[in-house]
Image: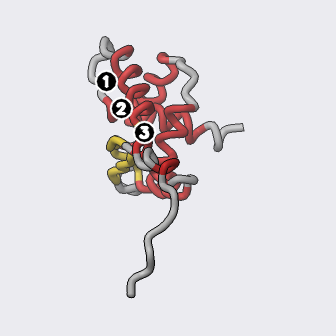
Amino acid sequence: MPPKLHGDIKGLELAFVETRRRLVGTTVPESVFFRMQKHPGSISGCYEDAVNGFDGNLPALVEAAVLFVKQRKLRASTDPIRTANGRVYLVTLERIQEIEKALASVRGMSRAKVLAGLLHLFLTQFTEP
């Protein structure tokens, strides 16, 4: 005989509502990809923290994106490029879109470059004194 079903689920009606996430990603050197995987929350957590830790300095973000792209190209032969996709909360995606919109006048700027710049700013804060 199967067990009887029991318990009050009234408080759990919205348990899955806040878990909706959206896919974001960019290409990164393999060494950065592995650093992102080791981050708490893995790649998705790394994106969340990079976006949430951004202080709003748009010139610094563009400079970081340019540096990230240059370094990625220069190291491509020794540090293969990987695609780092992660899922972020809707509010985080809206913040990324807000940054994209603010940088729309920068030629060649894309969501991937915005993410690359955010990652560069976020990851270098732990390696620089």
Cα–Cα gap, marks 1 and 2:
6 Å
Q: Nearer the viewer, mark 2 or mark 3?
A: 3
Pick out the residue farthest to the top: 105
At a point 43% along the width and 47% down the height, the residue shown is: 13
Instruction: Using a 10 Å C-alpha cutoff, classify the residue at mark 1 as few (fewer than 14 neighbours), some (14 to 19) or many (20 or more).
Output: some
Asked whether the beta carbons under mark 1 and mark 2 sit within 8 Å of each other, the answer is yes
Rendered position, 37 above or below 50: below
Instruction: Using a 10 Å C-alpha cutoff, classify the residue at mark 3 as few (fewer than 14 neighbours), some (14 to 19) or many (20 or more).
Output: some
| Secondary element type, mark 3 | strand
Cα–Cα gap, marks 2 and 3:
19 Å
Picture disc at residue 21: none
Q: What residue type is labelled 2?
A: Lys
Q: Quadrant of the N terminus?
A: bottom left
Left or right side of 120 for 101: left
- Could you say which is closer to the camera, residue 116 or residue 93? 93
Q: Nearer the viewer, mark 1 or mark 3?
A: 3
At a point 39% along the width and 20% down the height, the residue shown is: 98
- Quarter where residue 65 is shown: top left
**Would residue 32 be visible to someone looking at this image?**
no
Residue 36: x percent and y percent?
49, 52
- Quarter where residue 21 is shown: top left
Residue beneath disc 3 = 89
Picture disc at residue 109: 1
Q: How many labels does the image show?
A: 3
Residue beneath disc 2 = 113
Q: What residue type is labelled 1?
A: Met
